[in-house]
Image (cartoon, grey):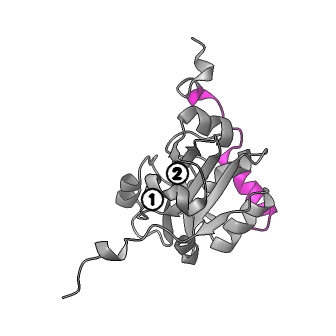
Amino acid sequence: MDTRDTPEGRAEEPLPTSPEQLLEHLAALGIRTVTHSHPPLHTVEESKALRGALPGGHCKNLFLKDKREQHWLVVALEDARVELNRFDKVIGSGRLSFASADRLWRHLGVRPGSVTPFALVNDHERRVRVVLQEQMLAHDPLNYHPLLNDRTTAIAAADLLRFLRAGGHEPLIVPFGEEPPDCQPALA
């Protein structure tokens, strides 16, 4: 078996764009960021435990595919509810499921645990559609991994939009992820 064709075999391959190249690209667009180094984080729970008082909106990123083979990057606040069995109706896609690590590498050039809107810098063919949670954009700054999960980069919401659009990705901005009214606790 040729391990270069598996996500495990790619663990040693260099990223198509390094975090340093990404930050240079952002600077060339006139976008200011602040990056913090930390041990690798793989989950929202790990991030919550380590981040301390790091300000801003802390986010999660879901790389999905639909039954028509369209790929989607959903970016939302870390506690947002994303019900995949209903989310297709929110964004107008086919039925959604998580995309494989191999697809993640082929389309966004990052590994599991490092999914980020910044990975769209590697989607030169614009094959991935990006969905942003409307409520997330009210936070300043927003925090994402800069292609590796051993650092976090803070960026203003307006600058995130500028970055996406500069790469030819017009985001779909939709409200989602809050508890439905019937699930909220009653006030005493």
Which segment did they paint magenta? Answer: 10-31
The location of residue 163, given as percent across then percent down, is: 73, 62
- The quarter of the image holding the N terminus is top right
User: CB under 8 Å between callouts 2 and 1?
Assistant: yes
Question: Is residue 17 in the magenta section?
Answer: yes
Is 87 placed above or below 158 here? above
For residue 82, the mark is 1
- The residue lying toward the viewer, choosing from 101 and 15, is 101
The answer, for residue 32, to whether it is visible in the render is no
For residue 16, the mark is none
- Residue named by callout 2: 62
Q: Residue at x 38, y 58 (%)?
A: 50
Is 182 placed above or below 112 here? below
Is 150 placed above or below 90 here? above
Q: Is residue 43 left or right of residue 94?
A: left
Question: Could you tell me the amino acid type at mark 1?
Answer: Val
Q: Residues within 10 Å of mark 2 (few under 14, many from 20)?
A: some
Badge 2 marks a residue whose secondary structure is strand
Q: Residue at x 78, y 45 (%)?
A: 124
Is 168 placed above or below 70 here? below
- Quadrant in which residue 127 is drawn: top right
Circle nearer the viewer, 2 or 1:
1
Q: Earlier in the sequence, mark 2 or mark 1?
A: 2
The location of residue 154, given as percent across then percent down, is: 58, 65
